[in-house]
Amino acid sequence: MSESEKSAILEALKSVNDPDLGRDIVSLGFVKEVKVCGAAAAVTIELTTPACPVKDQLKEEARQAILGLPGIDEVNVRMTAQVRSSVTEGRPLIPQVKNIIPVGSGKGGVGKSTVSANVAIALAQTGAKVGLMDADIYGPSIPTLMGISEQPVVGSDNQIIPVTKHGVKVVSMGFFLPQDKAVIWRGPMLDKMMAQFLGGVQWGELDYLIIDLPPGTGDIQLSLCQKAPLTGAAIVSTPQDVALNVAQKAIAMFDQLNTPVLGLVENMSFYVCSHCGERDDIFGTGGARRVSEERALPFLGAIPLSSRIRQLSDEGKPVILVDLDSEEAKSFVQVAENLAAQISVQNMSSEVSQEIKVSF
Amino acid sequence: MSDRIKPIPSEIGRANENDIRVLWNDGHESVYRPRYLRLKCPCAGCVDEWTGYKVLNSEAVLKDIVPLSIGLVGRYGVRVQWSDGHSDGIYTFNFLRELCPCQACGG
């Protein structure tokens, strides 16, 4: 292979743009390997997430770009992914975790846990290494949602070994609490628990650690934002609480703590009647999209209100595992892909602007 | 997100033996005398949480107080470990910038 053939291919690939990062894949450094053998070319493209929503599109565009070159009539494009890390500063509490993403809401009952669980599984299914921390100590529902009945064990170094289910490493307060007992703690205890769940768990190497927060803007949220350099938060809301200005409180909190908001998810967005198929916007619809436009935040997707999601969640069989082709599952996959894309955008931009050097 | 573009530090270190130097990502440079910063401690023990009145007795703060270490708090502030054992205050980046004593900032 001559250098000129290689540079011709790189030149051709400059026409392929990543729509989320807004630059071409060559200058982003995604093109890892270029080989030419006679009339056949092979390239490897390394994306910043295996959950890239435009993976297939990029692959096809790259193929067409190279096929447009004279003398090439066969192209093999291999897609891989290397998730970028948002951890750049200081002494991170969990250095092997590349991205920490809290999922929050202004109020309870909007479906944070359901969204967290399904998004975590969706990310894991793309091949990413994913952890799910249930920080909702008041009503830990992740074990139920994920169908986990086993108990985590404690390793030799006194660290908790998370339970792996559906490809996701899970830790929840629900594991340690009898069902009829409640957590009635003041701030310092909550603070300790967050430290334990972050630093005292053998998370191992993770691309994404999703944290299911308790509702509101309290101790746990504050502790988390202080203890760990978070990549950014996802906010779940229903059309209703956006209307009541509650979801905006969660955005304001993360703003104040200088934690980027990666986007909004609208849950219970609409209802499709299982008998007649007619759509009903029970709580109104599109509110979260409107707020994300107002605040210039990404809108990550809308999840329908569906008795199927509720039923399967109660049975511990996330809809995304049971029926991947259903509308419900597709909406979760879309949210997961958009979230992964926003994490990449965040990390690519923070590589230049967010690093803080402390030498003291 | 225009209201979110606030300067954040790019470097935090020592200006000399005792003074603290912060270089901001907008190019501004702040140098803080240790005692000045210690007196501005925003923690609940030094400032009344409800009224905002200063509780800290300035005269009780050592004249030669020095910072022993500085650490980041999340992505929004720093915590200073002072030589008098105090380390409760979290100086948010915004607060720290407001405290900049340089002439251009009105100090």
Image (cartoon, grey):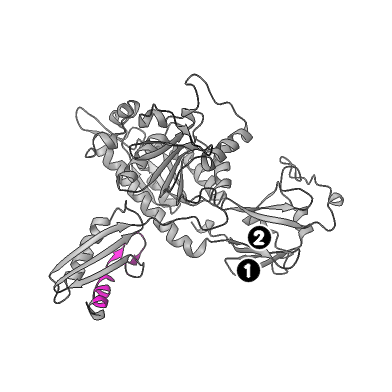
Percent x, y of residue A88: 51, 58
**Mark 1 to mark 2 CA distance (whole Å):** 10 Å
Judging depth in this view, the residue of A118 and A195 nearest the camera is A195
Q: Position of residue A99 (x, y in %)?
A: 45, 50
Q: Residue at x 30, y 65 (%)?
A: A17
Q: Position of residue A43 (x, y in %)?
A: 24, 66
Q: Is residue A359 one of those drawn in magenta?
A: no
The chain containing the residue under callout 2 comes to B
Q: Chain of mark 1?
A: B
Q: Which disc, if any, is residue B28? A: 1
* Residue at the spot of label 2: B97
Vertical order, A2 against A26 (above or below): below
Residue in the image at 55% along x and 57% along y: A89
Q: Position of residue A211 (x, y in %)?
A: 46, 41
Q: Residues within 10 Å of mark 2 (few under 14, many from 20)?
A: many
Q: Does residue B11 appear in the picture of this structure?
A: yes
Seen from the viewer's position, the closer of residues A34 and A272 is A34
State the extent of the magenta-drawn residues as a range: A6-26
Q: Is residue B20 left or right of residue B77?
A: right
Above or below for B31 versus A292:
below
Are dots 1 and 2 in contact, CB under 8 Å? Answer: yes
For label 2, the SS is: helix
The answer to whether marks 1 and 2 sit on the same chain is yes
- Element at badge 1? loop
Amino acid found under the numbered disc labelled 2? Arg
Residue A218 visible in image = no
Label located before the other in sequence (1 or 2): 1
At 24% from the left edge and 73% from the top edge, which residue is drawn?
A: A9
Above or below for A145 versus A119: above
Instruction: Report the amino acid beneath label 1.
Output: His
